[in-house]
Image (cartoon, rainbow, N blue to C red):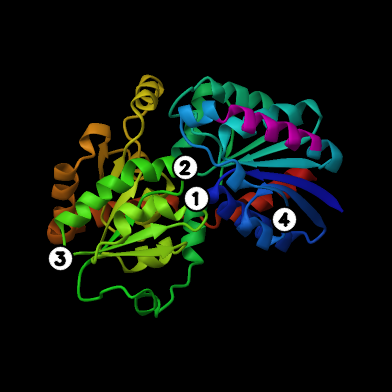
Amino acid sequence: MKKLYIIAGERSGDLHGSNLVKSLLSRDRNLSIRGFGGDEMKKAGVDIFVHYDRLAFMGFVALLTNARTIFRYIKLCKQDILQVKPEAIILIDYGGFNRKIAKFGKQQGIKIFYYIPPKVWAWYQKRAFELKQNVDKLFVILPFEKKFFKEKCNWDVDYVGNPVLDAIKSFKPNPDFLIKEGIDQSKKIVALLPGSRKMELKRIIPLMAEVVRKYPELQFVVAAVKNLPGELYKEIENYSNVKLVFDASYELLHVAQAAMVTSGTATLETAIFNVPQVVVYKTGRLEYLIAASVVKVEYISLVNLIAGKKVVKELIQREARLNSVGEELSRLVYDESYRKEMMTAYNLIYKTLDTGSASENTAGLMLEYLK
């Protein structure tokens, strides 16, 4: 039996890791897969050694203050890998942790596959050379990444398509979702996607609460997550025009007319669901200053990065305030020509990404490279 070790350190990695594992096991049942991940990967057949909820720290300051915890889990991970003796280690996103494991695995003579690599094209571009040194095969999910690695460090990597598209294509909406959640169907529905990390919610929920107060005629629905403390949503949940739905962001986007989205994978998911959106992002002043000094790209949302131009408005830090967000949200909800223009751009992004199943493409290549 072939042994593989897989590592995903956050919620989106768990989802994409689960789809990859399903594709691997459908092609080869003679696989034993163990590692770091979450509930989705466990359901797909992974023997979970450590759950990602112990590792989901975000931002420079959070990483520094939790450094001891992170290094403890890196040590545990290395020990477990030595005990398992896998033929290959599959790394999914989670750059700070997984880059260290890549180096360790390479030193042990284990094949290193990296699916959904760190965004080295956005900052710390020199890390592209580190990845080339420690990773046997890199599987990228954004079209421009293949060109970046070739031009930056003369590395031919595999573009496999985007797993977000896979997840959405396999999604089956519940026709009773609105009734089940008690959502007012007489009002236009605005999705609020504040993210899945504590620090994201602490920064953005107060702004979302201000927006909710300003637009009582709209039905706001928050995409909440169960693995976060409930008090993070307290500032917004008691308004009469607000509903919280848990772990049902796709169901919500399927019925929404507009969305306010914290930057991240959710911006791309919102675009694929064809929902006009405004992207908002707020972080600590120190973290923002550090990020601003190292970021090498013009945009923060995947929508604009893939399009190579401004498709959705990005309101960051001081720009992320009630008047700016409210003005943009009004256009998204009530200006039909503005909505159509954005959705036309979304359609081009969809066509760019639609290259078959990323999970299937990646699984096939990985098993081929293992031979």
Cβ atoms under marks 2 and 3 closer than 8 Å: no
N-term-proximal mark, 1 vs 4 = 4
Query: Circle 4 sits on which residue?
Result: 46
> How far is disc 1 from disc 4 in space, using C-alphas?
22 Å
- Find residue 55 and report its image quarter: top right
- Find residue 68 and report its image quarter: top right
Query: Circle 1 sits on which residue?
Result: 162
314 with respect to 70 (left or right): left
On the question of residue 282 being in view, the answer is yes
Of badges 1 and 4, the one in the foreground is 4
N-term-proximal mark, 1 vs 2 = 2
Query: Circle 2 sits on which residue?
Result: 142
Which residues are the magenta region?
66-79
On the question of residue 136 being in view, the answer is no
**Front residue of this view, candidates 5 and 117:** 5
Magenta-drawn stretch contains 247: no
State the residue at coordinates (20%, 76%): 186
Q: Position of residue 202 (x, y in %)?
A: 37, 43
Of badges 2 and 3, the one in the foreground is 3
Cβ atoms under marks 1 and 2 closer than 8 Å: yes
State the residue at coordinates (49%, 52%): 228
